Amino acid sequence: MTVIVPFVSEASQDERQAWCEALPEALSGVATVKPFEDLTDEERKLATVAIVANPDPAKVAALPNLVWVQSLWAGVERLTAELPADGPLIVRLTDPQMAETMSEAVLAWTLYLHRDMPRYRVQQDRKIWQGHELKLPGEQTVGMLGLGKLGAAAALRLKANGFSVLGWSRSAKALTGIACHHGADGLRTVLERSDILVLLMPLTEDTKGLIGQDELSACKEGAALINFARGPILDEPALLAALDNGPLGHAVLDVFDKEPLPASHPFWTHAKVTLLPHISAPTITSTASKIVAANIGGYLAGGTVPPSVDRSRGY
């Protein structure tokens, strides 16, 4: 009997199409992947595992016997918020390639700030030919807020490229060659010492609004900020105030409270903002599909569910 695995997604048409091509190929010989809309009533009742990407909770609820769902994204805050606590287990995508891709993005945009690219962009617009003193990477302190798999990989890559790196997490962690801090006092220390701040923690009830007016006011004069985490972690009005009135000198933003970012939002035209359309670490379908296939194959063969999200922590 062929096992049917539902694919439930409200992602963009292009993204859904990419997955609809990659997943059936990766799961060939293991199971048949079918979009939710193509399932029969019987197939919905029989499904015990589903693959999801930004799913409609009502569609997930229409699969009454789910044991677990495999998310195609590392971030699962919407799933934990919208699926009932007694619903299916949630397995987030853990792809080593994602950590590599994110660490590359963090290094690239840290170098963008380190090499004064925003200043030279303004000079180009004004037709100003003027060089500025270049600091060594070791003279720049980068504060990494969030030391999970993505944050740890990014911190180590920055360190390997000569930057002085501080790390922060909610609970104590250790990384070779990096001074790690934790808790409220540790956060204050990292904010006060960093020339460039990188936000890379998950969005949970504890981190929502974590970086607000008080935290931004603690930053160095002229410090820069990169947000590659989630929009609601950073208070947008407080950030605008810190850019307009100090102490922040520039912000690289890839995530926002509302996405796509509304055309009327002041970030679009702010002179001290570099804006990206949530592209810092996209899921690579080729590598992620193989991981999904291995997880579902193991479950169908022996009933083993991969490690799932701790709903009380949100990740």
Image (cartoon, helix red, strand yellow):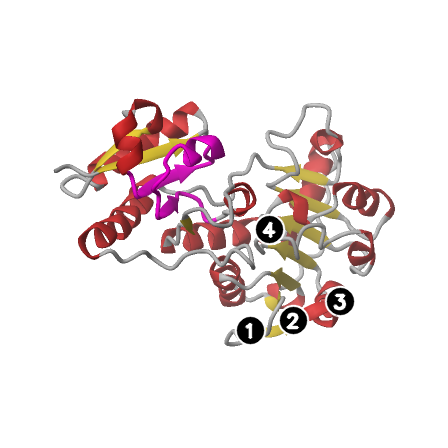
Image quadrant holding the N terminus, namely top left
Label 4's element? loop
The residue that mark 3 highlights is 188
Q: Residue at x 60, y 41 (%)?
A: 255
Disc 2 or 4, which lies upstream in sequence? 2
- What residue does disc 1 label? 173
Numbered range of the magenta stretch: 47-74
Question: Residue at coordinates 25% horizontally, 46% vertically from top-left?
Answer: 293
* Circle number at residue 203: 4
| In this rendering, position of residue 125 left or right of residue 57 | right
Q: Earlier in the sequence, mark 1 or mark 2?
A: 1
Of marks 4 and 3, the one in the foreground = 4
Distance (Cα) linking label 4 and label 3: 19 Å
**Residue position for label 2:** 182
Q: Amino acid at mark 3?
A: Arg
**Which numbered disc flags the more N-terminal residue, 1 or 3?**
1
Q: Could you give the CA–CA distance between mark 1 and mark 3, rounded to whole angstroms?
A: 17 Å
Q: Is residue 21 visible?
A: no
- Which residue is at 34% across, 42% downward? 65
The answer to which image quadrant residue 32 occupies is top left
Q: CA distance from mark 3 to mark 2?
A: 9 Å
Label 4 is placed on what type of residue? Answer: Leu
